[in-house]
């Protein structure tokens, strides 16, 4: 069967190949430690699960939900923005529910791109930005995220003709895969850029609640003018270990929220209401479980950073996200390095190329395995001297 061209234009999914390699190794009896998984290992807090169970019993929840989401969930999202970020949102016109933020991120380009229109995408970046733009028939212009710029794109480096053709820009802080955070100044520049070139800003805030050492990540909505030029995607997936539930939200510019809901209402019928009740509880109740979980990630982060430092890497401790992003030794390409590490140690790290060409001299470690296994992985790396090529520079 001949597939449509839009599918042929999608980037090959590197992670499928990686999965095959892992399953082969496991069959051979190798004790694989997978540090490649961007999915929290800890369970959803019990009170949230209990709410889902109770709501699943209610017949009213068994019917079609609305595409826009329950008003009570949208109110919870608005309250949470007010409480945590001092941001005022109208729950009716400026908040909508999504079937996970990935769903909204992927559908947005269908609302704003005509064939050939340009979408601005960070490189490295979450692969869904590129996929959504490509499926909608748009063209991606990649904005390189470089260590020397704190992994923030330099907007003045985007060629003026590209700025004029651009309809949409994705940004994502705290960032996957780099763990970088945005500055307020950067968000101000983004708003000014959006106004000058009439570009819709879509901020992916999946890690908004995942900060360490007292650092509280910024919401794009906190910057004056943000709501006039953009939207922000959020979800309890990473903060409340709810990746499997498939619930998220979009907030901000009311026309954009409405347009996305119009598109969605032609495709999906919203998230199961019992799941929406779960998300409400996640936002409305005590955040103690989140605090405990952040303490766990922080200890894991420190284990990885200390091991990498022992091996000769010079890295700061990321203040947010659940990832460590580090350069490969002596500029080795990322697949070669990840293969080398895997064959020497049975430890899976993610080759940076999976997030874009700029990532090809990097690898990502996820903090989604428990401390004992993480320590075991790090011990294996230290023992096998995986940083062999940096010996001279120590
Ligand atoms: C995990 C992740 C998401 C998706 O979250 P869902 O709400 O579960 O769809 C979005 N953006 C980034 C950068 C992520 O890492």
Image (spheres, helix red, strand yellow):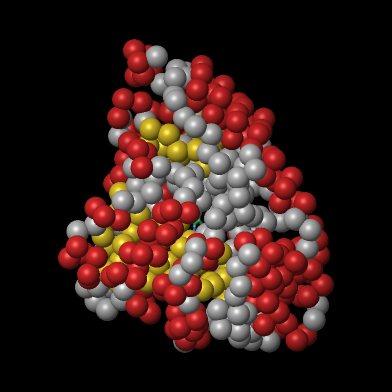
Residue 276 percent across, percent down from the top left: 68, 73
Residue 265 percent across, percent down from the top left: 50, 86
Q: Is residue 197 left or right of residue 344?
A: left
Residue 372 percent across, percent down from the top left: 67, 30
Residue 276 visible somewhere in the drawing: no
Question: Quarter holding the N terminus?
Answer: bottom left
Q: Is residue 390 left or right of residue 284?
A: left
Question: Quarter holding the C terminus?
Answer: top left
Residue 213 percent across, percent down from the top left: 63, 39
Q: Residue at x 27, y 62 (%)?
A: 140
Total labels: the figure holds 0
Q: Residue at x 67, y 82 (%)?
A: 71
- Asked if residue 55 is positioned above or below residue 365 in the image, the reply reads below
Q: Residue at x 64, y 47 (%)?
A: 41
Give the quarter of the image for residue 55: bottom right
Give the quarter of the image for residue 191: bottom left
Residue 219 visible somewhere in the drawing: yes
- Which of the pair 389/123 is nearer the observer? 123
């Amino acid at each position: 069967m001949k597939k449509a061209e839009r599918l042929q234009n999608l980037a090959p999914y590197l992670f499928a190949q990686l999965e095959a390699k892992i399953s082969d190794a496991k069959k051979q009896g190798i004790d694989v430690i997978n540090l490649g998984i961007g999915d929290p290992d800890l369970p959803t807090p019990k009170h949230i699960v209990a709410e889902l169970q109770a709501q699943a019993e209610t017949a009213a929840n068994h019917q079609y939900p609305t595409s826009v989401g329950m008003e009570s969930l949208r109110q919870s999202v608005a309250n949470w923005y007010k409480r945590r970020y001092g941001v005022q949102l109208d729950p009716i016109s400026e908040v909508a529910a999504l079937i996970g933020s990935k769903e909204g991120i992927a559908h947005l380009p269908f609302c704003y791109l005509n064939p050939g229109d340009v979408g601005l995408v960070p490189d490295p970046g979450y692969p869904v930005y590129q996929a959504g733009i490509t499926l909608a028939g748009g063209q991606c212009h990649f904005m390189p995220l470089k260590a020397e710029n704190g992994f923030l794109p330099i907007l003045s480096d985007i060629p003026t003709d590209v700025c004029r053709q651009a309809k949409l820009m994705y940004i994502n802080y705290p960032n996957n895969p780099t763990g970088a955070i945005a500055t307020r100044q950067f968000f101000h520049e983004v708003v000014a850029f959006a106004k000058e070139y009439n570009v819709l800003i879509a901020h992916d805030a999946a890690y908004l609640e995942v900060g360490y050492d007292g650092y509280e990540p910024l919401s794009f909505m906190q910057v004056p003018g943000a709501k006039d030029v953009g939207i922000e995607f959020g979800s309890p997936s990473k903060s409340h270990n709810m990746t499997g539930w498939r619930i998220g939200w979009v907030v901000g510019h009311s026309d954009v929220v409405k347009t996305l809901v119009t598109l969605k209402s032609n495709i999906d019928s919203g998230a199961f209401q019992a799941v929406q009740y779960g998300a409400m509880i996640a936002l409305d109740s005590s955040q103690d479980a989140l605090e405990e979980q952040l303490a766990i990630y922080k200890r894991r982060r420190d284990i990885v950073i200390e091991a990498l430092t022992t091996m000769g890497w010079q890295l700061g401790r990321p203040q947010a996200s659940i990832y460590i992003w580090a350069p490969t030794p002596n500029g080795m390409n990322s697949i070669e390095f990840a293969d080398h590490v895997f064959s020497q140690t049975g430890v899976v790290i993610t080759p940076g190329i999976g997030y874009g060409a700029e990532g090809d001299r990097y690898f990502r470690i996820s903090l989604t395995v428990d401390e004992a296994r993480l320590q075991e992985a790090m011990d294996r790396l230290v023992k096998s001297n995986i940083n062999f090529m940096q010996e001279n520079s120590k």
